[in-house]
Image (spheres, rainbow, N blue to C red):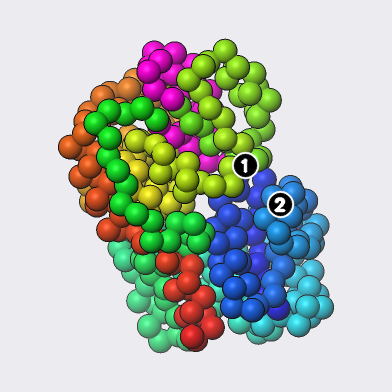
Amino acid sequence: MILIRADANEQIGTGHVMRCMSLAWEFVKHGQKLIFVTADHSGDELIKQKGFQSVCIDSEWTEMDSEIEALKRVIDKYDTNLLLVDSYYVTKEYFNELSEMVNTAYFDDMNISCWNIDFLINYNIFATIFDYSEYDRTRTQLLLGPQYTPLRKEFRNLPKHETRNHVKDILISAGGADPEHITERIMNGICSEMLDVRFHFVIGALNPRLEYIINISRDKENVVLHINENHMSDLMMKCDLAISAAGTTLYELCAAGIPTITYSLADNQLVAAEQFNRKEIMLSLGDCRNNESFIDQIKFAESTMDYSTRKKLSERMQCFVDGNGSERIVNEIMHI
């Protein structure tokens, strides 16, 4: 049995669970059984909708040391052979205790410590910038770089994106929780000024302002809401441009080849947005927090996305991510 320890809630959105889902489906394809383990019930419906079982250990998701004993009991109960953890609140004690019982894997986005684990996964564009030399004399196998981006099967080996002469459809993604209210700000500040463009808003299942967003979208004929969208690759491929927070969605957009304007809405997104911009794969607007001119910056950035710019970015993006990362990770872990 494989246990996946990840949470989804209004504070952190759905990103941790969703990238684990990509691996979960790949493990199942290889005949493995797995269960998600969560601190509370906030993500239950999302996990269930995707066809997986979850076990709640009734812990505090920001205090992971407090759940160690409860998690040990779950590991024993299900005869677990691998524990995959995706949380920014792990500690050295957490992995020291659990690695004595079971093989461990961890999604590491920030390299804040040398963890006692068997597999470390950092698929981010900035992964190779980090100094992971502390692991040289450990058992830990490092899976680093965008070739390990855990995308769903629908993003594998997509055809080249067709660049149209004019932008007619724009995808907007502000993450699962959208703490900076980017969705509403774009709806109110941009959509009414660009009536010849359809805006496709991807709304996370745990967005706490879902009803409000639905209400303000009703009088906007060029706004389409995609709530809990199950066919993201199809939606992306229909769009000419994307405006997206710097989470895992950026790697999905790369696989689909959708020219993207990105931005950061959390500290852990700052480096990714900067690196995508520096490598001239996407255009970054930087940190949107406490930025009163953010909507004006989006308008200006969109105006610079002419045909040649979009075509160049699309080609670079699809060379960068091929969508086969989940398969590579599972093959490494299972020694295939």
Magenta span has 211?
Answer: no
| 15 vs 217: above or below | below
Q: Picture coordinates of residue 222 (x, y %)?
A: 48, 20
Q: Is residue 95 visible?
A: no
Q: Is residue 103 left or right of residue 171?
A: right
Q: Secondary structure at mark 1?
A: loop
Q: Assess whether mark 2 and mark 1 are in contact (beta carbons under 8 angstroms).
A: yes
Magenta span has 175?
Answer: yes
How many numbered discs, if any? 2
Q: Is residue 304 left or right of residue 109?
A: left
Residue at 34% across, 69% down: 131
- Mark with earlier residue (1, 2): 2
Q: Quadrant of the N terminus?
A: bottom right
Q: Quadrant of residue 31?
A: bottom right
Tell me how far mark 1 sits from mark 2, CA to CA.
Answer: 10 Å
| Amino acid type, mark 2 | Gln
Q: Picture coordinates of residue 181 (x, y %)?
A: 54, 28
Residue at 27% across, 58% down: 319
Residue at 24% across, 50% down: 315
Residue tagged by mark 1? Answer: 228
Q: Picture coordinates of residue 262 (x, y %)?
A: 37, 39
Q: Picture coordinates of residue 245 (x, y %)?
A: 44, 40
Residue toward you, 142 or 50: 50
User: Is disc 1 surrounded by few (<14), some (14 to 19) or many (20+) residues within 10 Å?
Assistant: some
Residue toward you, 332 or 166: 166
Specify start and end residues of the magenta stretch as a single range: 170-198
Q: Is residue 49 left or right of residue 292?
A: right
Residue tagged by mark 2? Answer: 49
| Amino acid type, mark 1 | Asn
